[in-house]
Image (spheres, helix red, strand yellow):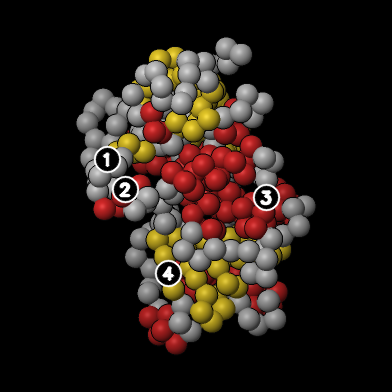
Amino acid sequence: MARVRLLAASVNRVDVYMRDSGAGITHTLPQTMGVDGVGEIVEIPEGCGHAVGDRVILYPYEFCGRCRYCLAGDQPLCTNARIFGEHRDGTFAEEIVVPVVSLVPLPQDASIHGASALGVAYLTAWRMVFGKTPTGPGDTVLVQGAGGGVSYAAMQLAKMSGASVIVSTTGPAKLNHFRQLDVDVIDYGTEDVAKVVLRLTSGDGVDLVIDNIGEKTWPSSLRSLARGGHLVTCGATTGAHPSADIQRLFVRQLSVHGSTMGNLEEFRRLVNAFTSGGFAPQIDSVFPLAEVPAAFERLEHPDRLGKIIIEIAESSK
């Protein structure tokens, strides 16, 4: 195990869920919240490839390393997984003790705020974009509700892959923001998303839809897909029981994939893409550790765009 002095973390919707009830997630109160984290090692066993003072980003899982899923390299499916801030104490703290395998090196010149946003939103988006149905040049991707953390990350990663990107959002500030990013923008408050998608794609539809909204967007997500297309979902903020539209699924041979975070190798690739300049996380605002409740309020604000960061301490270097 390693002891890490935390420098920054970021806020995710699961943090608000854990604050409000945490129903269905095995945990024991009191419990420190926070899933993402960046810090500096203050204590670690010798000979493990890291040293005291190294800056690291935390892979937000404890996993057993022995079950069939871990042995296959798919740690998020570990039958004994414990996620920081959900099943065990998390990163909204001055220090944290974590398994050495959860430490990924972070260069000294990397943005601490940007790195602290990677563990949940960007790792989840990475698997959605590059996982079961890898996206690349020639593909077209629709990202629903692109102002949220995971959706914004998916938009950036899909663009990085060379795909054409369409986003849905609403509100003047968000609409203007995305129009400046060389993506097609649909105002879901005033437009029929699926109809606009079909117009933009000459009637074909998109190859991939990223949807973490659920019931409200599900019909338009399915209707926006090209034949043989894929819908990847990682959330259900507007409800978990949409119409399955089974006839559309089999007639058009569509597929629906569930996705949550990613494995350790995907995380390393994500960190490498970040540190090499492939993308820079969109930061909405930064709050000190003492103002986590205010950060939660900001997360729920309709004008929020991008990640909310919790600044915990200054780097010692």
Q: Which residue is mark 4?
A: 256
Return the residue found at the far bottom.
251
Q: Earlier in the sequence, mark 1 or mark 2?
A: 1
What amino acid type should be assigned to the residue bearing mark 4? Val
Q: Return the residue nearer the eye: 93 or 18.
A: 93
Q: Nearer the viewer, mark 4 or mark 3?
A: 4
What amino acid type should be assigned to the residue bearing mark 1? Cys
Question: Quick one: label 3, few (<14), some, or many (20+) residues within 10 Å?
Answer: some
Q: Earlier in the sequence, mark 4 or mark 2?
A: 2
Question: Quick one: label 2, few (<14), some, or many (20+) residues within 10 Å?
Answer: some
Q: Are marks 1 and 2 in contact (CB under 8 Å)?
A: yes
Secondary structure of the residue carrying numbered label 4? strand
Question: Quick one: label 4, few (<14), some, or many (20+) residues within 10 Å?
Answer: some
Secondary structure of the residue carrying numbered label 3? helix
Q: Looking at the picture, how far across and down is residue 89, in whole percent?
A: 32, 28
Q: Which residue is mark 1?
A: 64
The N terminus is located in which quarter? top left
Q: Is residue 93 above or below residue 306?
A: above
Q: Earlier in the sequence, mark 1 or mark 3?
A: 1
* The disc label shown at residue 174, or none: 3
Q: Is residue 174 left or right of residue 241?
A: right
Q: Nearer the viewer, mark 4 or mark 2?
A: 2
Q: Earlier in the sequence, mark 4 or mark 3?
A: 3
Return the residue found at the far top.
316
What amino acid type should be assigned to the residue bearing mark 3? Lys
